[in-house]
Image: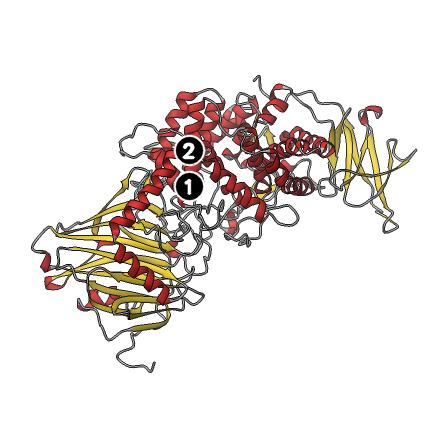
Amino acid sequence: MEPSDTVPPGKPGLPPRWTSSAKSGVGTAGTAASRIWFTVSHGILNEIYWPRVDAACTRDFGFVVTGPDGYFAEEKREADHGIAMIEEGVPAFRLTNTARDGRWRIEKEILTDPKRETLLQRLTFEALQGAASDYRVFGLIAPHLINGGKNNTGWVGDYKGTPMLFATGAKAGALAVACSVPFLARSAGYVGSSDGWQQLNKTGELDERWQQAVDGNVALSAEIDLSGGGEALIAIAFGSRWEEAAYKAQSSLQAGFDVARRAYSAGWRAYQKRLLPLDRPAGASNLNSYRISAAVLSTHQPASFPGATIASLSIPWGFSKGDEDLGGYHLVWPRDLVETAGGFLAAGAVDEAKAVLAYLTAIQEADGHWSQNVWLDGSPYWGGVQMDECAFPLILADMLHRRGHLDSIEIARILPMIEKAAHFIICNGPVTGQDRWEEDAGYSPFTLAVEIAGLLAAADLLEIGGRTEAAHYLRQTADSWNDDVEYWTYATGTELSKQLGIEGYYVRIATADSADGASPLDGFVPIKNRPPADMTKHATMLISPDALALVRFGLRAADDPRIVNTVTAIDATLKAELPQGPIWYRYNGDGYGEHEDGRPFDGTGIGRPWPLLTGERAHYEIAAGRMAVAEQLLDTLEQSASSGGMLPEQVWDSTDIPERELYHGHPSGSAMPLVWAHSEHIKLLRSLRDGAVFDMPPQTVKRYQHDNTRAEVRIWRFTQKIRTVSHGRALRIEVEAPAIVHWSKDNWATTEDTPTARNAFGIQMLDIDTARIAAGRTIHFTFFWPDSNRWENVDFEVTVERARHDAHRGSR
């Protein structure tokens, strides 16, 4: 098309941006025929996802109202917003936007057509001052097809005589917008220069000469004829071609809103009816928080990819992010996924929890690990390896088995997955490449707890499959790591512990063993989201609620003095007292959050409190037998939700900054809803009902609290060169290839040559019995590698120290 006055100016438009992550509602029909999901915030539609829950296709769709004498108002910015579910537990919404100047009200009912990939908005406009004919209403939509705001093309056209708006994306996909009443005017333009908002704000009219905007950040606009009573039904449909999208929009309009609503509600009623009755009396918000959380979990798990639940239908600080933030939070994190499966299981949604296990089995990498996060089809997005994510699926499999939801055939089917995962953990743990906050490598109490519990779970499942030797080895490894948890992560005699009057505390994370350090606690930890001048902290100076995982996963009792000391340290450094109650930070010095002035996180910032951590703290209180405290913390968690019941990732902990929509104790600009937080909410409801922590593994509790099992071995590896072994514990040397260990217990006065043996996981190992070596002696050793006919030419040493008899556990 040649440049002319019929071509909208400003190509390609402003750099595309997403929109607010503070969703007030999310929804979907949840049927295989309707692969479409939607989000709402600030009284309007935000991202609509199609054909997968990890593919956003719009930025937003809102309305502008104009009137006499240049009157111009945008419902998103110049109205007070109300939201309600059309029915309890059914994530379809009635939005009420009342102009702050008192002139008009817009009411919308929003849901998706269960039979088609169409979103329906039933719109009602009411004049509160003057007559309805004094006002004009315009719809504005910003296509961002398949996670991209660049290189979209939008145009005005017809489908078999019906006027519509259309757009196609650079990668794939098309959308069509149709209406049950006439469009009085239509226009296409480039964002920031010739989009509908710019046109109406400047002239009060749409320029109908602008029929097409090609290859840019485009926007489509239309004036809606509300002269017939102020009501209209608007359909937004998607397809691989624009004709397909138009057909779906037309078909949904013909069927009507009420037909879609009946089917939509019936489907959600059937889902909610299957769940356990964990409902609590509605509080001041008059919301059934349990049913909202259950709906949030299910909305994020698509029928087209059973089990694949994304972390959130949002992009943190999305208004500052563009196409470069391709994934946002609409990706699958294996950790979040297993936590979500626990929420499903706690609610009684067994099929959904089993679907998660099947999905994880399908996307496991060949070497046994799971990628840091993935698209729905299992393709990795970020490349990190987090050992807790590699162990969580084992805990899920065991939890399903223990609760009677896996039969012998199903267990046999998953055993290869279990074995591969366990093999990866024992070969690469206990050090993790990233902690659960995806930042630092080392020894994390949270990761250690999940790894050890995961190994014991895998041992039980492998034993069912007749793999007795493998099961025994996993338990020995778990015991060895469990005995060293304090060595790796418990700091004593620090300035903080002296200030607080406690012996010590578990740290957030400690560095991997190094030859020049007395212990991992002597290392320094980089804080990845802080300015360069403030990026490195001594390991003993970092505190985190992560240590409570040692109780949550059964390794330590709630009344273990070291746990109690750590709780004192956590509360002294990380607890924020907010209007709704106490909420905790991830760790001291955290930079993942808004800047002091409220600017969005841009790689650095200031960490804000996480309601999720209040749920985790409540579970600790349950483990400690303090049910009343846990109930209070449940109230705090629920009161941290938005007006629509969405639980945020973080809440704002500073003074109000109204111009940035930041209010003390209210959701910040990070992700909302956070599915993980909603899962924790459901598990907390279940735990309170049961009077016990719902997802605490019994193996760890029995083995390390009741039976007080001590390790038989301590493991030396090239990646973990231990310096000491307690007298009476075997020194286990593990290597990847067959070796002859040339060793001495008397400083090379005499030597022995002992070959390694291959164990059930293909690991070459040798156990040296220290019971026949006096305490204080040092074992010297090196390796001859027969396969390559070479010596290692480096000597290693491990000192036999006096046996330790300290109990790890409390009095439980």
Left or right of residue 101, residue 631 in this image: right
How is the model colour-coded?
secondary structure
Q: Nearer the viewer, residue 394 or 627?
A: 394
Local secondary structure at mark 2: helix
**Residue 415, quarter of the rendered image:** top right
Q: Is residue 143 visible?
A: yes
Query: Marks 1 and 2, how far apart in space?
Result: 10 Å
Residue occupying the point 10% across, 56% down: 132
Q: Residues within 10 Å of mark 2 (few under 14, many from 20)?
A: many
At mark 1, the secondary structure is: helix
179 relative to 377 in the view: left or right: left
Quadrant for the C terminus in the image: top right
Is there CB contact under 8 Å for labels 1 and 2?
yes
Residue 480 image-quadrant placement: top right
Task: Locate residue 618, reporting x and y percent.
Answer: 44, 28
**Amino acid identity at mark 1:** Leu
Residue 266 picture location, percent across and down: 32, 41
Q: Which residue is mark 1?
A: 297
Q: Percent x, y for residue 455?
A: 64, 34
Q: Position of residue 199 (x, y in %)?
A: 23, 68
Task: Tell me the number on the disc at residue 255.
Answer: none
Q: Residue furthest left?
A: 130
Q: Which one is in front, 540 or 356?
A: 356
The residue positioned 35% from the left and 42% from the top of the image is 267
How packed mark 1 is, by other alpha carbons closer than 10 Å (few <14, some 14-19, many 20 or more), is: many
**Mark 2 = which residue?**
682
Which circle's residue, 1 or 2, is located before the other in the chain? 1
Q: What amino acid is at disc 2?
A: Ile
